[in-house]
Image: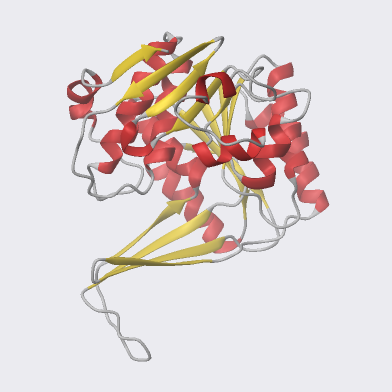
Amino acid sequence: MILTITANPSVDMSYQLETLNIDGVTRTDRVIKHAGGKGIHVGYVLGELGDEVVHSGFVGGKLGEFIEEGLKERGHEARFVKIKEPTRNCLAILHEGKQTEILEAGPTISPAEREEFIKKLDEISTGCKVISISGSLPKGLDSSFYEEIIAYAKNKGIFVAVDTSGQSLKDVVNVKIKPDLIKPNETEVADLLGEEITKDNIKEALKKAPLADIEYVIVSLGKDGAVVKAGDKIFKASVPAVTAINPVGSGDSSLAGAIYAIDKDKSPEEVIKTSMTCGLLNVLTEEIAHIEIENFDKYYEQIKVEEI
C-alpha cells in the first residue's frame, strides 16, 4: 500500500468551450469536476497500475468532503486531516485550442492543524511501504513540514519520495535526513547545484552533494526521456516519438510508475522503464493522470535504458 500526501489539494473543474466570450456570457454542458492535486494525481495512476492507495493531506468544508467522496468512489482510502478553512477550487477553461487556468491559493493551515497531522502520522501511514509527497505547500506551512514527514518515514524504514519545487525542494535536499527519491527537471538541478547543466556534465552533477546521498534522482528531459541516478549508477532513458494529446499530468504519472516499481522491489532499470512508460501513456490520453493500462506492455518494450 502506498500513501500519497497532498498538502494543498483542490477540486479541479474543467470547462470545455467552443469560444470564450470575454466580458459576456458563455454557457457549457461540458464540465468535469474531480479531486485534484499532484499527490492525488499520482494516486490515480497507482490505482490504475493495480496498487492500493491511501491519500492524505488537509481538507475542509464541503469541497473537502467532495474530495474524500470522489476518492472513495475510485476505491482509494482517504485519511485526511480536517481543517477549519475550506479546500480550494482550481478552474481550467479549454477554449479555441488554448487552456486558461485560474488557481485559488487555498486555505491557511493553523499551527494546531499542522501539529495534528504530524501527531497522526502513525495512523495515516499504517500499512504503507512508500510515502509520496507532492506539490506546493499551503499558507501556514513551510518546508519544515515536509522535512518532519521525511524524517518520520526514514525512521520507520518507509521509502519516501518528494516532488516539489523552488525553496521547498532546496530545503528538503539540503537537510541531514533526505528523501529517497526526487524528480527535478534540468533547470532545478542547475539551481540546486549552482552551475549550468548540460548533457555533457549531468552525469557528474548528479553525483555531487546534495544529490549524491539521494537514492533516486529522476531528471525529466521531456520528449527526450530522462537521466536517472539510481544508487551510484547513472542511466539514460529514451522514449519513442509519439503524438502528444495532453502532456498535463505526465510528471505525476511518471512518478507513480517509479513508485509502483519500487514498491514491487523491481530493479533500477525496471523502475526507470515503468516510470517512463507511465509518463508516455499519460500524454496519449485527454484525461489528466490517466493511463490506458492495456497499452502498457506495448510501450514498456520500446523504452530504452542504458547506463552512462
Quarter holding residue 147: top right
On screen, residue 290 above or below 88? above
Rendering coords of residue 63 (x, y %):
53, 61
Residue visible at 42% across and 49% down in the picture:
70
Rendering coords of residue 1 (x, y %):
50, 23
* Quadrant (top left, top right, bottom left, bottom right) of the C terminus: top left
Q: Horizontally, is 173 left or right of 221 in the view?
A: right
Residue visible at 65% across and 33% down in the picture:
193
On screen, residue 129 above or below 242? above
| Residue 233 in view (yes/no) | yes
Rendering coords of residue 189 (x, y %):
58, 34
Rendering coords of residue 96 (x, y %):
23, 71
Q: Horizontally, is 56 left or right of 245 in the view?
A: right
The image's colouring method is secondary structure
Question: Which sits in the foreground, 83 or 292?
Answer: 292
Question: Which sits in the foreground, 278 or 239?
Answer: 239
Quarter holding residue 242: top left
Q: Residue furthest bottom?
A: 24
Residue visible at 56% across and 19% down in the picture:
204
